[in-house]
Amino acid sequence: MAKTPDFTKPFQDMLANFPVDTSSLTEAFRSQSALSERMTRVALQAAERSTEISAAWAKDTLSRMGELTTSKEQPSDYAKAMSDFASAAAELAAEHMAAYAEVAKKVQMETVDLLLNASKDVQADAQRMAQAASDNVQKAARQVQDVAGTATKAPKA
């Protein structure tokens, strides 16, 4: 019965002979983690501020409803109270929507700033990695030339 050859050792030897620098992958992971952390911080700050705006809006609306629910002497007073409430609600809506717009604007500016800085970091990393790869290729080419030169100069038996 034929025995299947075990290629584990030859593959391990072959992969061990390839010079792989994992520091660039580690650095890329760290950069990505830092970017994710900053983006998450921006998102959480925006969510916190949006929650504050929503709570203030609800509180303002509820306080205005208290005025609306008081008993009135004349039916026309109810209509006036409803009209006042609608006007106040529209005013509050405009104010709070402007506050939401400010939060969105701040998030957009911070996100653009983070992404621009990240792209600069990625560009610097790519340039550094390309230089390292070029140096490795040149080193390997010199080694091949040295081996080829040694092989041609070796005395023949």
Image: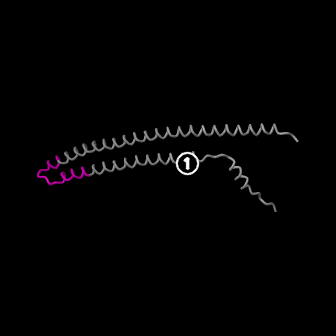
**Image coordinates for residue 137, horizontal then vertical, percent:** 66, 38
Which amino acid type is marked by label 1?
Answer: Thr
Q: What span is colored magenta in the figure?
A: 59-80
**Image coordinates for residue 115, horizontal then vertical, percent:** 46, 40
Image position of 157 (left or right of 147): right
**Image coordinates for residue 111, horizontal then vertical, percent:** 42, 41
Please state which of residues 39 and 91 is positioned toward the viewer in this rendering: 39
10 Å crowding of disc 1: few (<14), some (14-19), many (20+): few
Please state which of residues 120 and 149 is positioned toward the viewer in this rendering: 149
Seen at 77% across and 58% down, the residue is 4
Describe the element under mark 1 as helix, strand or loop.
helix
Seen at 33% across and 41% down, the residue is 102
Count of labels in the image:
1
Seen at 53% across and 38% down, the residue is 124
Q: Which residue is mark 1?
A: 26
- Which residue in the rendered view is the most extreme toward the left? 73
Residue 81 colored magenta? no
Looking at the rendered image, the quarter that the C terminus falls into is top right
